[in-house]
Amino acid sequence: MPDTEKRKRIVARIAQYEKEGRFNEDVEEDDPPIPIKPGEVDYTNKKLSSRMKTSFANFLGKTFFENMIRKGQLIIKEVHGLDSVNVSGGAIVTCNHFHLSDNYVVYKTIKPILRKHHYLYKVIKESNYTNFKGPVRIMMRHANTLPLCSNVSAMKDFFAGMETLLARGEKILIYPEQAMWFNYRKPRPLKPGAFRFAAKYNVPVIPVFIGMKDSDVLDDEGYSVQELYVHYLPVIYPEDGLSAKENADAMMKKNYALWVEAYESFYGEKLTY
């Protein structure tokens, strides 16, 4: 059964954290992550068993989210700007993070420009990989997810996987706001990780900003299901002559500026916190 009181606490925590400027902190009430061990994650699906699990997990995820769409629990209203995204090789995709379904929204809308047999890979936090049970566990572990790790040696596997995937032309979704804030409409200040990857591996960033409007449909917890307006913004490329650090910083600032511009244009108001 939906835990409406838990959701109320999370919404209140978002308001509190916004007031305190704690924009990148988790508001969800998750259990501490179970650490991932070195060699535990097959980031590039080298094993046949991994590829089989990925195929099943993607089928499970598609069935789950498409069922949400059919029921009106996930509403993709409009997509803008995709036709101007001309990136055939590897890239980092960034998006504001406000719901468990926003990764599927990005995948469904970006799919027309993905290469044949390519998927959208998603960087996730460690607890999402280790803590869930049941069908959600299968999707979190195998639906082209790339979990971060608290173990330093295990993170070496993550970095190696990122490098391989980008080199072969994959698109990797990273949430630079870091934490998911339920139905939060404003772009939040960004963390540099996504842009460090882009600078290090010399790949562009594809910024995505999703605007929201209340629909007349209520979810299981009594909140309005959001109509989603997906905006693909101008691609950000690393600049020649800059160091990796300088490029990462410049790309992060440009991404945030584009998100702010998209927010103010869509909602018709200046961004204030």
Image: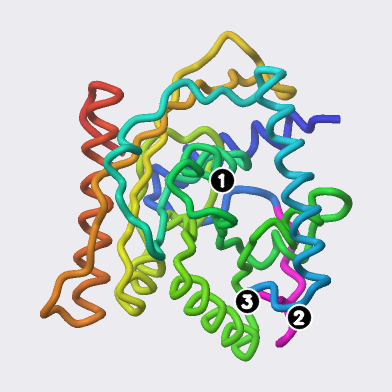
Q: Which residue is mark 1?
A: 103
* Label 3 crowd (10 A; few <14 / some 14-19 / many >=20): many
* Label 2 crowd (10 A; few <14 / some 14-19 / many >=20): few
Image vertical order of residue 181 relative to residue 129, above or below: above
Q: Which residue is mark 2?
A: 40
Magenta stretch secondary structure, dominant: loop
State the image quarter where residue 259 is shown. top left
Q: CA distance from mark 1 to mark 3?
A: 20 Å
Who's the residue at 69% across and 30% down the image? Answer: 66
Confirm whether the magenta stretch covers residue 48: no
State the image quarter where residue 30 is shown. bottom right
Image location (x, y in percent) of residue 57: 77, 53
For discs 1 and 3, the disc positioned in front in the rendered view: 1
| Side of 37 relative to 80 (left or right) | right
Q: Amino acid at mark 1?
A: Asn
Image location (x, y in percent) of residue 27: 58, 49
Q: Which residue is mark 3?
A: 149
| Side of 141 relative to 76 (left or right) | right
Circle 2 — which element?
A: loop
